[in-house]
Image (cartoon, helix red, strand yellow):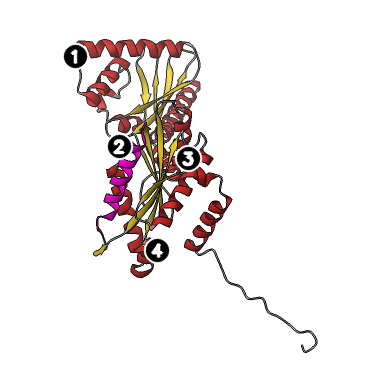
Amino acid sequence: MELKTTLEELSKREKELEQLNGWFDVALNNMARGLSMFDSDQRLIVCNNAYREIYELPDALTKRGTSLADLARYYVKMETGKDGPEELASQRAWIDRHLEEIGHGKTFSHIQNLKNGRIVLVTNKPLTTGGWVDVQEDISERRKAEQQISWLAHHDPLTEIANRTHFGEALDRALQNLRPTTGFALHWIDLDRFKQINDTLGHAAGDALLQSVAKRLLASVRESDVVARLGGDEFVVLQAGVEEWNTAEELAQRLLRSMNEPHFVLGQRVVIGASIGIALAPQHGRSAEDLLKAADLALYRTKRKGRNDFAFFEWIEQTSNKSSLDVDLSRAVDDGQLELLYQPIVDFKSA
C-alpha cells in the first residue's frame, strides 16, 4: 500500500514537473528578447527561439552542450566569410577577454551590428556557478528612431540640408578653430523674386524651388563647407579655409551663376536670382553675433545695389545706426510685418 502511494506521488510529481517544463518552454520561446545560458565550461545550457532567430542558427548549434567556440566560429563565418587560422585565433582571444569580464562578477553589455542590418544589444549576467546568461535585444528600430530624431534636430526636412541649429554649431566650431592665417567666410543668401513665384505658382512650386536651390548650393561648394537653410528663402554657406578675399569672391560668383540658371519645378521653367552678403572671419568679427550682423548688413548693401549680386561687409556700416535701421525696415517690408492702422477721431460733444 505504501509502495503504491509512493509510485502515485512520483507519477504525480513527474506530471507536474513535465507541465512546469512545458510552461517554461512556452515562456522562454515567447520572449521578445533572445536568451542563452552557458555553464562554467563555456557550453550552452539552454537558449530560446529568439536567440536562434537573431543569429540564424541551425538546430545542431542550439543543442545543450554546444561550445561557445563553435557558436562564435559559425557567427563570424556567416558575418565575414572568414574561417582561417588567424580568424580562429582572434575568436579565441575574444573568448578569453569575455571570460575575464565574466570573472569580474558584474553585468556588462556590448553592441553587435549584424550583416543583415540588425543592431543587437547583448547584456551578459555572470552566474555564481561560473557560467553566465546572455540577453539579446534587437534595438534596430530604436536606433533608427534615435538617428531620425537626431537628423531632424540638425536638418531642414524640406531641403534635407543643415538647419539653423546645425549651422550655429558649425559656426561655433569654426570660431573655436580660428587661426591667424586661416579664416572662413559667411555667405548670407537671399533669393530674388521667390515670393512672387511662390504667390503665382503656389506653395508646392515654391517648395520644389527651394529644394532645387539647396541641391545647387551643395553642388557649388566643397565637402568641408556647410550649406544651411535659415528659414524661408534664406540660406547661408560657411566657407572653410578662406585666406584671401578673392577665395570668397570666387565662390560667390559660382553661387550666383548656379542660381541664375533656369530651375524646372513641377513642369514650369523658373528664373530667379540671388543676393549675397559676405562676412569674413576674423576680419569682420570673432563672434557669431558680429559675423552674422556683418553678413546681414552686406546683404542689405547688395539689395541696395539692385540685387542679383554680392557684396562684402564694409566697416563703415557697422557704426551706422541709420544703416541698421534701414536693414530692419527693409526686412520688415519684405516679410510683410508692417501694417497701416487708422486712428479714429471722435468729437465727444457731437457723439
> Residue 344: percent from the left, percent from the top?
68, 79
- Crowding around mark 2 (Cα neighbors within 10 Å: few <14, some 14 to 19, many 20+) is few
Q: What amino acid type should be assigned to the residue bearing mark 2?
A: Arg
Mark toward the start of the polypeptide (3 vs 4):
3
Q: Circle 3 is placed at which residue position? A: 168
249 within the magenta span: yes
Check the image and report above or below for 11 versus 153: above
> Residue 335: percent from the left, percent from the top?
49, 61
Is label 1 in contact with label 2 (beta carbons under 8 Å)? no
Can you tell which quarter of the image residue 268 is in? bottom left
Check the image and report above or below for 35 versus 336: above
Q: Distance between the Cα atoms at labels 1 and 2? A: 43 Å
Q: Circle 4 is placed at which residue position? A: 195
Residue at 27%, 17% (x, y): give it. Answer: 70
Is label 4 in contact with label 1 (beta carbons under 8 Å)? no
Closest to the camera, between mark 3 and mark 1, is 3
Q: Which is more toward the observer, 62 or 305?
A: 305
Mark toward the start of the polypeptide (1 vs 2):
1
Q: Which is more toward the observer, 200 or 15?
A: 200
Magenta stretch, main secondary structure, is helix
> Residue 51: percent from the left, percent from the top?
35, 30
Q: Distance between the Cα atoms at labels 3 and 2? A: 19 Å
Numbered tag placed on residue 222 in the rendering: 2
Is label 3 in contact with label 2 (beta carbons under 8 Å)? no
Q: Distance between the Cα atoms at labels 4 and 1? A: 65 Å
Numbered tag placed on residue 46 in the rendering: none
The residue segment tinted magenta is 243-264
